[in-house]
Amino acid sequence: MKRKSVKKLFRSVSAVFAAGVMALSVMTGSAVTADYESDIAELQRKRASLAEEKKQLEDSLGSYESGAEDQEKYLELYDEKMKVQEEEIANIKEQISILNDDIADLETQIKGKEDEVAQGIEEFKARIRAMYMNGNDSIASMLAGSVDFYDILARTELMEKMSRHDKEMIDGLNEKITSLNNDKETLEATKTETEQKKAEAETVLVELQQTYADHRETKEWYEAQAEYSRNRTAEIEQEQADAEVELQNFIRKQQEELERKREEERKRKEEEERKRKEEEERKRKEEHQPRRQEEEQKRLEAEAQGVEYVPEPVEADPEPEEDTSEDTEQYVTGASQGFIWPCPTVLNMTDTYGYRTINEEGGASDFHKGIDINKPGCAGEPIVASASGTVITASNTGNGYGIHVVIDHGDKIATLYGHMSSCCVNVGDEVKQGQTIGYIGCTGYAYGNHCHFEVRVNGQHTDPLNYVSMG
């Protein structure tokens, strides 16, 4: 998985906390309860922890994948170096083999020359032995056996030639043996030097193999860490989905509770109004009872005297005044007012609701749950409440929205304003339509200054352009 895939996963946590609290309707004039704040705080801590862990995994995954790629490059480099070194060792071995063959050839030649010397010596010994056996072991014998002076000279010259030939032959053979031995010593020295080079090359190869093994081990470690990061990211995504279900269940219970309280409040006021009217009727009757008795007495007396009784005109009782106090006003939702554009000074929109391509992440695609409102130099421009309502979030909750505000407008409709540089309202505040609630910024998971605006119905995101327009 590439890094951009983990960023896409990280963005999914951005909606988790806000998706829950946005749909929560708050009764008019009532503040967020302690139980609600406690529950939301716990959900917020849980989601912030997941978001932080996912962000760390995102950062580490890129580092692990980069490390594995670097180690792969090292492995390719050292693999090439080992091939070169193995070729060099093979070449040296070939040189040593050639030297061994040359040395063996010289040893054969030396052995042949030594055999020739030995044979010449044996032949010389045989002639001496024959001369001794024949009595020709002295010059006197040689002279005695000569027939004349010329024969003596011939025999003497022959002996000298034979002696000189044997000496020259033996000396030549000895010189050849010496030369061959010198060549052998040179080859053996060269072989020793070559074997030393071979040993050094083999040492280098062992070092390269060890370095290669180290890089492979490091690469495997990076790959294992990257795989763990991917698997843990998938687990976090599932945990976030489970938490979203948990939060939606919590929202529904809160909504049901609020509706129940509103219904109880309505019935209570109706009962109070009924009792008030009954009490007023009772008091009115009590006030008119003496007068009715007096009128009845006068009528009876007139009948006794035979006179027609004409009752005196009676003023009609005044109609009871309507109670216009705040306690008797009906609950009016902000949603019934309609919605206005949240950035009155920035009438420009970039990303719309739905699937989009993120160029900053190499063309990655994700589902955009709102619209992005911006223009050059829009940092610090005011953001206003799109409709009247109650602030249920006004902080940086650790998710991708950064500093953001969520307003409940009743009728299970809420709006979210994200990536603010700062906000100027607090949880529980009642805000009017068009009231400034914060300023455009670039906090949270954002690529530039803008206002991310969402409309959620019963906790589910919907297209804001069904509610607002720039016109």
Image: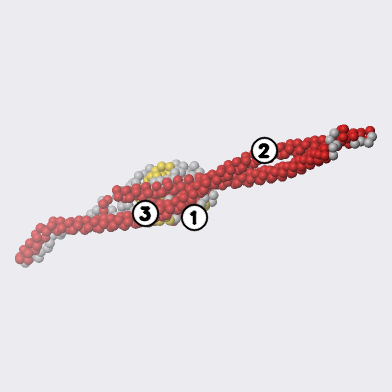
Point out the frontmost of discs 3 and 2: 2
Question: Residue visible at 90% across and 33% down?
Answer: 143
Residue flagged by tag 2: what amino acid is it? Answer: Glu
| Residue 183 point in image, percent of width and height | 74, 38
Question: Residue visible at 28% across and 55% down?
Answer: 261
Question: Residue visible at 58% across and 46% down?
Answer: 75
Label 2 crowd (10 A; few <14 / some 14-19 / many >=20): few
The mark found on residue 247 in the picture is 3
Residue 154 relative to residue 265: left or right: right
Label 3 crowd (10 A; few <14 / some 14-19 / many >=20): many
Spatial distance from mark 2 to mark 1, Cα to Cα?
72 Å
Residue flagged by tag 1: what amino acid is it? Answer: Tyr
Residue linked to disc 2: 193
Residue 274 relative to residue 154: left or right: left
Spatial distance from mark 3 to mark 2, Cα to Cα?
79 Å
Q: Earlier in the sequence, mark 2 or mark 1?
A: 2
Marks 2 & 1, CB-CB < 8 Å contact: no
Q: What element carries label 3?
A: helix
